Amino acid sequence: MPKQVDHEERRAAIVSALWKLAGERGLDRVSLRDTAREAGMSLGQLQHYFATRDDMLVFAMDFISKRTTERVTARVLALDERTPEAILRMCVAEMLPLDDRKRQGSRMSISFYVEALDNERLLSHAREGSRKLLDFFEQQLREAQDRDEIPADRDPRREGMIIMSVVDGLTSYCHLGLHTAEEALAMAMRHLDTLFGAAHETKR
Amino acid sequence: MPKQVDHEERRAAIVSALWKLAGERGLDRVSLRDTAREAGMSLGQLQHYFATRDDMLVFAMDFISKRTTERVTARVLALDERTPEAILRMCVAEMLPLDDRKRQGSRMSISFYVEALDNERLLSHAREGSRKLLDFFEQQLREAQDRDEIPADRDPRREGMIIMSVVDGLTSYCHLGLHTAEEALAMAMRHLDTLFGAAHETKR
């Protein structure tokens, strides 16, 4: 009887091989053939899952973002108080490169981003991913505003974009060595303090 | 009599060739040899100016940042009122990819950044450049605080880092197509409104 192949497991192994090679030499220098070799399969076997390099990159982006979403969701569900503020703080902390795995993931995301700038399909994929995150942040901020926890004159979508930008920028400067991830976390939290503190000075 | 060679002009021509090639295929795929060919000189002639690819990249980074500094300085000097707030707003507007040239420059900076992540010499160079910009922002914000234009409880260095991050993040999302550069400018200005407005609600 032939051995059953777990296709999801094989896809995960491919992403893991891609991840490893990208960490070593940069994503742009990783081909389908290299990834097949690293994953211990033939190019033909790999192409059974991903016909093109773009297909593989799109899957890898989705795979990483799905795992991140699962991890953050589990943490949000474990919160004592699931207020918009607590949820936002949790998300921001999870997005920063605070441990080796997140640091590696963040480097990978930067590589994906740069690759996407010259690839219309990856670009529209990355754009939709960012838009979903922005929608989620906006929704949390809108709810916070309804609860009178951020000032009424703040635009929730703009503030959501600012938070995403702050996290991305702080992450870039972490990788550059301008500050540590812990310092970035402290700055991001102080930004949220200011946003949430402005409506309720007396609460703090 | 042999023709005099203007070395600064030749260096500028090399950077211009590098810039063009990087825009076409990504900085990581541009070699010294390609750049020499594009600049219409031999590899040996180019190596008279830059012995290694790293030397060329460091010079190109400096060249671009020097030109940006000159442009921003000229604009600052032309301001009617050289207040810290006006200076910061000018810098932020100049950093955003509001025209084709700045858009191209911003793409180039992103390429430099990614290249630097795997290259210790470029990394320390890029880090020093960012640190200088942060120092300048901090100094402006400290002066604004002394003038009672931003709240006393804000940390000037943190707020400077937040502004740099906001600009970088908004720029990344411009390139991703999540918003236009004009929308990014409006968001960045509203961020500064909030920072400067918080101490003087009545001024607005």
Image (spheres, coloured by chain):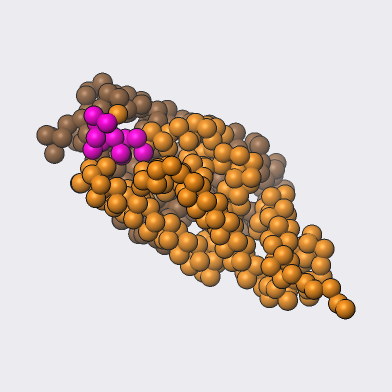
Chain colours: A orange, B brown
Image coordinates for residue B12, horizontal then vertical, percent: 53, 46
Image coordinates for residue B182, horizontal then vertical, percent: 31, 56
- Extreme-right residue of the structure: A1
Quarter where residue A197 is shown: top left
Quarter where residue B204 is shown: top left
Q: Residue at x 60, y 33 (%)?
A: B124
Q: Measured along the vertical axis of the image, is residue A44 above or below residue A159?
A: below
Residue A118 appears in the rendering? no
Left or right of residue A86, residue A202 in this image? left
Give the mark count.
0
Q: Is residue A200 magenta?
A: yes
Residue B80 appears in the rendering? yes
Image coordinates for residue A124, horizontal then vertical, percent: 48, 67
Q: Measured along the vertical axis of the image, is residue A200 above or below residue A148?
A: above
Q: Measured along the vertical axis of the image, is residue B197 above or below residue A134?
A: above
Q: Residue at x 46, y 55 (%)?
A: B104
- Extreme-front residue of the structure: A80
Q: Residue at x 36, y 38 (%)?
A: A192
Between A124 and A48, the one nearer to me in the picture? A48
- Extreme-left residue of the structure: B202
Left or right of residue A40, residue B162 in this image? left
Q: Which residues are magenta?
A: A192-203
Q: Residue at x 25, y 27 (%)?
A: B151
Between A31 and A137, the one nearer to me in the picture? A137
Image coordinates for residue B92, horizontal then vertical, percent: 34, 42
Q: Is residue A181 magenta?
A: no
Q: Quadrant of the N terminus of chain B?
A: top right
Question: Please, what is the dominant secondary structure of the magenta stretch?
Answer: helix
- Extreme-bottom residue of the structure: A1
Between B84 and A13, the one nearer to me in the picture? A13
